[in-house]
């Protein structure tokens, strides 16, 4: 079944209303009425996508001419880590880097907010996955009122210009928002309390952010609306169903990589006459 990733793309200039996106939905996936059969089909498709992404990433790395940046954003417990594990399973770790942008350090705060981000953008042949990103500076910073509105409100234009510069210099940008419901977040946070092997994931600060859910949804809506561009599109992924989330993100990554028209470097001109000595 063809998967149209454009169905998940935020059109430039459109106004996003996340209340209109059902986090339990599965766009572009015709689910089987038999849950077991549907899950088996989903698992099989994900395995195919893993193999395709692995081959394309190897080609990207070998060619060494193009760069890919994947930006992942979500609410706490939205599934960023799980998505990275499932989508990039099996890829060559030499060609994939995954920086995580947590609370800025003092040296980072002493500089402009894009300084710490720019140092981690991909080089030729690399895929870089941002686990959180420069968008924290129009999300957390906005909701917690860490800087005045007159400052953070200008950052949408800064970010668009920054990403346009990266695209002009040869970086292909994919931006993913994993959209879960508030009820789903509650279940996932509760699991972190109930399951000992997940206790380490729980942070009391997650509950503070949860209490400001509506403010975060408004901040995400503005970020998605104001910064989805042709050269750096946002995709909204209904992410309550983890199996669908993994397939949707994998399809976006795979189809984007396939569109780059990559080629392996030419072989040595005398390769057919070369023999390996004993």
Image: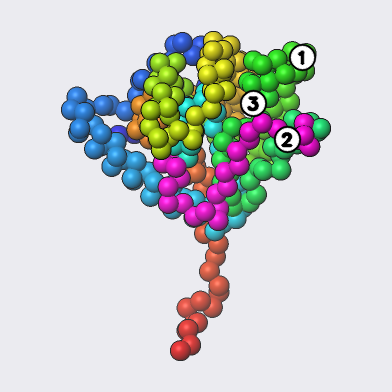
The image's mark for residue 105 is 2
Which corner quadrant holds the N terminus?
A: top left
Q: Is 236 positioned to the left or the right of 173 in the image? A: left
Residue that label 1 marks: 148
Residue that label 3 marks: 136
* Residues in magenta, as a range: 85-109
The stretch drawn in magenta includes residue 96:
yes
The stretch drawn in magenta includes residue 144:
no
Q: Percent from the top left, x then y, of residue 57?
A: 49, 51
Query: Residue 227's image quarter?
Result: top right
Whole-number angstrom distance, CA of label 1 to CA of label 2: 20 Å
273 vs 91: above or below: below
The image's mark for residue 177 is none
Q: Is 28 positioned to the left or the right of 74 in the image? A: left
Say which residue appears at 46% left-offset and 51% top-offset. Answer: 91
134 vs 86: above or below: above
Query: Residue 33's image quarter?
Result: top left
Whichever of callouts 1 and 2 sits on the residue coming sooner in the sequence is 2
């Amino acid at each position: 079944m063809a998967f149209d990733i454009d169905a998940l793309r935020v059109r430039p200039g459109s106004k996003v209303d996340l209340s209109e996106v059902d986090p339990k939905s599965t766009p572009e996936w015709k689910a089987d009425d038999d849950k077991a059969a549907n899950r088996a089909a989903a698992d099989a498709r994900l395995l195919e996508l893993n193999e395709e992404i692995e081959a394309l990433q190897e080609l990207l790395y070998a060619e060494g001419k193009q760069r890919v940046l994947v930006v992942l954003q979500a609410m706490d417990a939205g599934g960023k880590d799980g998505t990275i594990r499932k989508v990039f399973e099996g890829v060559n770790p030499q060609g994939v880097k995954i920086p995580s942008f947590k609370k800025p350090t003092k040296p980072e705060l002493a500089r402009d907010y894009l300084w710490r981000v720019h140092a981690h953008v991909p080089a030729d042949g690399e895929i870089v996955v941002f686990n959180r990103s420069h968008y924290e500076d129009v999300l957390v910073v906005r909701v917690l009122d860490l800087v005045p509105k007159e400052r953070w409100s200008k950052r949408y234009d800064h970010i668009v210009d920054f990403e346009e510069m990266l695209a002009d210099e040869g970086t292909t940008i994919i931006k993913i928002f994993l959209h879960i419901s508030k009820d789903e977040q509650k279940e996932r946070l509760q699991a972190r309390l109930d399951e000992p092997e997940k206790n380490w994931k729980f942070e009391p600060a997650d509950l503070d952010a949860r209490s400001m859910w509506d403010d975060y949804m408004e901040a995400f809506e503005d970020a998605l609306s104001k910064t989805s561009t042709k050269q750096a599109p946002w995709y909204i992924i209904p992410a309550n169903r983890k199996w669908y989330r993994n397939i949707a993100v994998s399809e976006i990554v795979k189809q984007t990589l396939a569109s780059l028209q990559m080629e392996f470097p030419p072989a040595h001109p005398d390769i057919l006459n070369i023999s390996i000595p004993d």
